Image (cartoon, rainbow, N blue to C red):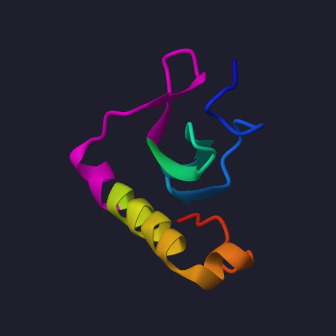
């Protein structure tokens, strides 16, 4: 049985603003066409100091999420950005 994922689970691109990040992943559909999926996460440390991630965002996280999503969308719709590493991982 063939998987609907590419060979790696690593993101093809990641945009990070503080503790909020968007990761872009390539997936293969049933016809073998590549589609891009985005994952939006917020990182935090728990009471024991271990890093965790969540899909829950506070009011203060929303502007960072919007920036990260906008950069991800810009990357996807700008042909030149896919051909080179013109848009590096963003950290703010």
Could you tell me which residue is drawn at 76 percent across and 37 percent down?
Answer: 8
Indicate the position of residue 58 as horizontal and vertical percent values: 26, 42
Q: Nearer the viewer, residue 69 or 52?
A: 69
Q: Nearer the viewer, residue 47 or 34?
A: 34
Q: Is residue 4 above or below residue 17?
A: above
Is residue 74 located in the magenta-colored stretch of the structure? no
> Outermost residue, front direction?
31
Indicate the position of residue 87 as horizontal and vertical percent values: 64, 76
Q: Which residues are magenta?
A: 41-63
Left or right? Give the position of 37 relative to 57.
right
Q: Nearer the viewer, residue 5 or 62?
A: 5
Left or right? Give the position of 76 relative to 10.
left
Could you tell me which residue is drawn at 48 percent across and 64 percent down?
Answer: 72
Left or right? Give the position of 50 relative to 41.
right
Q: Is residue 64 above or below residue 71?
A: above
The answer to whether residue 12 of the structure is visible from this angle is yes
Q: Is residue 78 above or below residue 65?
A: below
């Amino acid at each position: 049985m063939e998987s609907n994922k590419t060979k790696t689970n690593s993101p093809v691109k990641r945009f990070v603003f503080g503790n909020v990040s968007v990761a872009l992943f390539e997936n293969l559909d049933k016809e073998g066409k590549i589609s891009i999926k985005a994952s939006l996460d917020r990182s935090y440390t728990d009471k024991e100091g271990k890093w965790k991630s969540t899909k829950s965002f506070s009011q203060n996280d929303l502007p960072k999420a919007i920036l990260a999503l906008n950069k991800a969308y810009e990357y996807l719709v700008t042909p030149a950005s896919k051909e080179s590493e013109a848009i590096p991982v963003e950290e703010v």
